[in-house]
Image (tube, helix red, strand yellow):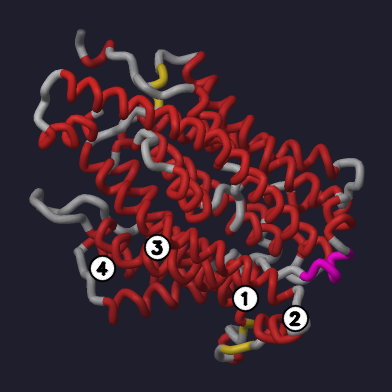
Amino acid sequence: MPPANRTPHLLSRGSWPEVRRIGDILRTETVGGMLLLAAAVLALVWANSPWSGAYERLGDLRVGPAGLHLDLSLAQWAADGLLAVFFFVAGLELKREFVAGDLREPRRAMLPVAAALGGMTLPAVIYTAFNAPAGGDALAGWAIPTATDIAFALAVLGVINTHLPAAMRTFLLTLAVVDDLLAIVIIAVFYTSSLHFGPLLLALLPLALFGLLVQRRVRSWWLLLPLAAVTWALVHASGVHATVAGVALAFTVPVLRRKPGPGPGLAEHFEHRFRPLSAGVAVPVFAFFAAGVSLAGAGGLGAALTDSVALGVVVGLVVGKAVGVFGATWLVQRFSRARLAEGIDWWDVFGLALLAGIGFTVSLLIGELAFGAGSERDDHTKLGVLVGSLLSALLATVVLRARNRHYRRLREIEERDSDADGVPDVFQGEQADRA
């Protein structure tokens, strides 16, 4: 049958180089997710301890040059500065996927893009339905439950997974990256309270120079980092959230090598350098400053979770994400020729859809932008994000552990069949990898 008539498969494994690259990313993000969880737990414990005042003073400590309007608190530096590194890496990953990865093929890109759109639309609708009767500023948080946290979700999957197909991990990573790009668009468009065109236009100059240098394959940090810092500072001064600068810088980096040959392109080189910094430092530090909510200050857990804002966030993450991602995936296969790859079941898709409800990092950021850091509604938002993400993780763990046992039994049956056929042991591991 000619390739044009071949039925596209949803959640297929992808090429071997892509699978190997995804494995390397997963190892970094899984460790980063563990650090993220530890930072969040430490912040919660400290914020509700007798030494909570010290935690608040640490977050409010201001550093930076006041003359440049960069005398920010440590919490602001974490949200505006460190998360720019996170979005720089996400931008590099997304560009690489669509330029040189498996998603350069429209039939492969269709599924994660549709799943990300479904997983953002329905949670926003659910949140709005919960808060429409209240009206007022409560509706400002409509985008809070739309995000999926890459590091946290992959950390949970890494703990669960021993025998799950590699295609599931690839799908989750790509979904989360597309999700992050859409989230930064939402932040830039809907959460820019005041826009100053002067600094924004000036930011185009260092951005263009940065792009010119990287297009010429310049890797000198003493040239590139100052230009990136100036771009970030001008975007910050413009009123647009400074993390947008990270994505803009990433999109200027070339993916393909100028001359064909072995070795990574510049985008992959930068990604390899900055991903450990993003997953191991930037995101955990942001979580430490963002997740520390005092239950007493929020009126108690019960009072906080009866607020329509917190309820909308919890239901949006747990129900909206799961139904949105699963439903969009089903619609793609229903109204196209695409089918699930051999060996993948709809229970696998449902487990990943539940896992997409872990909306930690970007959800906390949007909550701060919507209601103001330290406000009562921001505290309620944090509790809603924490509870919703935890419930999504627990439900996904139940489903995916059952699926992991299923694939483990299949692997054991294959190994017994190999033994019965007299295949030498040295080849069995290779056969299992191909399976």
Mark on residue 249?
3
Image x and y of residue 73, in percent: 64, 82
281 w.r.t. 140: above or below: below
Labels 1, 2: front one: 2
Image x and y of residue 222, in percent: 28, 81
206 w.r.t. 166: above or below: below
Q: Calculate the distance from the C-alpha at mark 3 to the C-alpha at mark 2.
A: 38 Å
Residue that numbered label 1 is attached to: 76
First reached walking from the N terminus: tag 3 or tag 2: 2
Residue 200: tell me if it is visible: no
Mark on residue 52?
2
- Please report contact status of discs 4 and 2: CB closer than 8 Å, yes or no: no
Q: Calculate the distance from the C-alpha at mark 3 to the C-alpha at mark 4.
A: 12 Å
Q: Calculate the distance from the C-alpha at mark 1 to the C-alpha at mark 4.
A: 30 Å
In the rendered structure, which amino acid carries the disc numbered 1?
Answer: Gln
Residue 27 appears in which quarter of the rendering?
bottom left
Labels 3, 1: front one: 1
In the rendered structure, which amino acid carries the disc numbered 4?
Answer: Leu
In the rendered structure, which amino acid carries the disc numbered 2?
Answer: Ser
Q: Mark 4, residues whose alpha carbon is within 10 Å: few (<14), some, or many (≥20)?
A: some
Magenta-drawn segment: 294-299
